[in-house]
Image: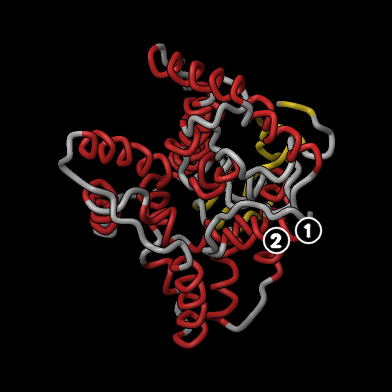
Amino acid sequence: MMRWYLHKLAMMFGAQARRPDKREETDAARVMKKFQKTPAESLKRREIIAHEHQYPLVSNKWKYMRWFSIIVINLMFVVSFSWDIQLVEGAMTASRFFGFHMADPTSALMVTLAYKDLVLNLLIGTVTVIILWWFFGGRAFCSWACPYHLLAEWAESIHLFLAKRGWVKDHPFHRGMRVVLWVIFMVLTFVSGLTVYEYINPIGIISRALIYAPTVALIWVVFLLGFEVFFTRRAWCRYICPMGLTYGIIGTAAPVQIKYDLSLCVHEGECRAVCLVPHVLEITKLGYAQNDIDYIAPDCTRCGLCIDACPQEALSFAFRGLDKVI
């Protein structure tokens, strides 16, 4: 069990997904896998998949809930500043909500490294944010609050439209590049005394542009989105963003998780096709699950797209330990 969990954790740092070995596989999973491979179940699975392809059942429940969440959260900053109601002060990287300090952990760490000083308010804000996103699963920030995520999701739709017609092709990078860049940003910040990452952080750039006024820095955001449309699908979120890695580490043992039920899965792969980080859904492949009931790897963004895409309801939001479906 522990080895399998460490493997899922390692995937967040760039390790390739693999099947569990016999020491990691539970008896329940072994029995279920054997049952699913019987001729009768294999035929039934093929029939279900064929029917789903002929009559696709499309749900956008979680997608539209996320879009609403991102828009509302970012509008609170805009309205608070424009109307001077002091509901939320600051921007996405550092703010105060009803007087409570909030600070993005990655940005806070870089400020500390740059100035070689630990500010109490920054520490309080960082701890507050860590507790908040630990509960929901660290990378839930990416899909439920990040303004760049929404733009990148729309850019991805354009990329997929063009790719379907053969006009563009995805050129993936190694996921371990994100870890290397995280270290590079930290080292450069410490050596230079400047928060280097913030100069190219599209999250902060978009947030400040919405709240205060657009600047020439938005050209960089447009370039990133264009790069994702024409060259690499979701490049920033998958391969570059150090904030995503930090939040992933924070949420490794989060109460809110996406639960996977092996007994309901027909392994058609629709969930992986829509996932922002498809490596976390490798367990949905036939023979890859460690248990009959398992939870998606820590790098999961809790976006819910896989839940929307699965008509068998093999995936669902749940409170881990309570086995309560949300």
Inspect the image, locate mark 1, and give the three-letter code of the amino acid beneath it: Met
Applied colour scheme? secondary structure
x then y, percent, for residue 290? 71, 46
Residue placed furthest toward the right: 322
Displayed quadrant of residue 115: bottom right
Residue at figure coordinates x 51%, y 50% from the top left = 279
Depth check, front residue: 230 or 268? 268
Tell me the distance, in whole angstroms, between the alpha carbons under discs 2 and 1.
6 Å
Depth check, front residue: 270 or 182? 270
Inspect the image, locate mark 2, and give the three-letter code of the amino acid beneath it: Leu
Left or right: 264 in relation to 201: right
Query: Which class describes the residues within 10 Å of circle 1: few (<14), some (14-19), or many (20+)?
Result: few
Query: Which class describes the residues within 10 Å of circle 2: few (<14), some (14-19), or many (20+)?
Result: few
Residue 2 badge: 1
Residue at figure coordinates x 39%, y 56% from the top left = 236
State which quarter of the image contains the C terminus.
Answer: top right
State which quarter of the image contains the N terminus.
Answer: bottom right
Left or right: 22 in relation to 183: right
x then y, percent, for residue 5? 72, 55
Asked if marks 2 and 1 touch (Cβ < 8 Å), the reply is yes
Displayed quadrant of residue 135: top right
Left or right: 40 in relation to 322: left
Say above or below: 292 vs 326. below
- Per the image, the residue denoted by label 2 is 6
Q: Secondary structure at mark 1?
A: helix
Residue 171 badge: none
Displayed quadrant of residue 4: bottom right
x then y, percent, for residue 78? 45, 40
Say above or below: 124 vs 237. below
